[in-house]
Image (cartoon, helix red, strand yellow):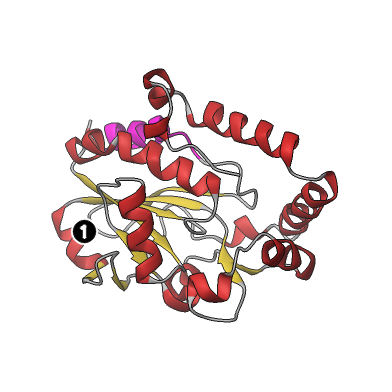
């Protein structure tokens, strides 16, 4: 299945709410993905929710863990450097193989000018290798850094990591989602999707983590947070 990028969509689709973009992708999944495969993915999400994994994510008012990571061009940057410039919006994603991650990144890319007007920077962090981050950045024409978090070290500090269940791993392998190749290790670990807004002093002022990878905060919600901070 080929997932359309926003650029390949009609001009009107570019400004649709993320929930509408996701609804369209869920309809395609319901239409083309075998029910037994859908059931495996649903069971994996239900298991994570039963564990209440999102509750372990760092909370508002906590100090954000620092990081030192290479971007899609292999240039290492420290979170302290980014915060010295202003506020920081971080999206933790699974990788370029996930259509919901792609949708979120393209939607966030569209509001990047407004984020920057709010005296903030936008970055994404995933466990995929620098090469895979480069491919994603180039293919989807993203204008913000994609950082590679080898071994999910930073995502682990943010309380987001889980091991892909065996049944779901088997599905991914059949679908050629080769996480050992994409991420450069054999752990089969991923972060649950999460978005954080961090103030200049390193304090987390917004936190959204969800065990369901098909649900992400609307970009306008992030803009609202930045607007409130500036008012």
Residue at position x 35%, y 70% from top? 130
**Quadrant of res 26:** top right
Q: Is 122 situated above or below 75?
A: above
Residue at position x 24%, y 70% from top? 78
Residue with the most extreme left position: 85
Residue 40: x and y, percent? 80, 55
Q: Quadrant of the N terminus?
A: top right
Q: Is 125 situated above or below 218?
A: below
> Does any portion of residue 17 appear in the rendered image?
yes
Within-10-Å neighbours for mark 1: few <14, some 14–19, many 20+: some
Left or right for 215, reference 83: right
Q: Is 102 situated above or below 18?
A: below
Q: Judge by depth and name the residue closer to the eye, 157 or 219.
A: 219
Residue at position x 79%, y 51% from top? 37
Most common SS among magenta residues: helix
Residue 197: x and y, percent? 36, 49
Residue 94 located within the stretch drawn in magenta: no
Q: Judge by depth and name the residue closer to the eye, 65 or 96.
A: 96
Residue 173: x and y, percent? 68, 67
Q: Is mark 1 on a helix, strand or loop?
A: helix
State the count of labels.
1
Residue with the most extreme top position: 12
Residue 165: x and y, percent? 74, 67
The residue wearing badge 1 is: 83
Numbered range of the magenta stretch: 217-229
Q: Quadrant of the C terminus?
A: top left
């Amino acid at each position: 299945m080929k997932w359309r990028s926003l650029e390949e969509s009609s001009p009107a689709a570019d400004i649709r709410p993320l929930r509408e973009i996701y609804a369209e992708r869920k309809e395609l999944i319901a239409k083309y993905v075998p029910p037994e495969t859908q059931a495996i993915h649903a069971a994996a999400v239900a298991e994570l929710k039963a564990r209440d994994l999102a509750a372990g994510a760092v909370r508002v008012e906590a100090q954000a863990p620092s990081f030192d990571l290479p971007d899609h061009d292999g240039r290492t940057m420290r979170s302290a450097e980014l915060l010295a410039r202003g506020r920081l919006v971080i999206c933790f994603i699974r990788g370029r193989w996930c259509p919901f991650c792609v949708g979120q990144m393209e939607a966030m890319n569209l509001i990047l000018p407004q984020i920057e007007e709010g005296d903030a920077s936008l970055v994404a962090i995933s466990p995929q290798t620098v090469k895979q981050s480069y491919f994603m950045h180039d293919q989807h024409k993203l204008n913000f850094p994609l950082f590679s978090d080898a071994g999910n070290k930073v995502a682990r500090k943010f309380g987001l990591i889980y091991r892909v269940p065996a049944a779901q791993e088997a599905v991914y392998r059949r679908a050629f989602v080769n996480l050992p190749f994409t991420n450069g290790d054999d752990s089969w670990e991923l972060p649950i999707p999460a978005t954080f807004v961090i103030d200049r002093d390193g304090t987390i002022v917004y936190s959204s983590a969800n065990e369901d990878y098909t649900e992400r905060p609307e970009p306008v919600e992030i803009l609202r947070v930045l607007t409130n901070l500036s008012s």
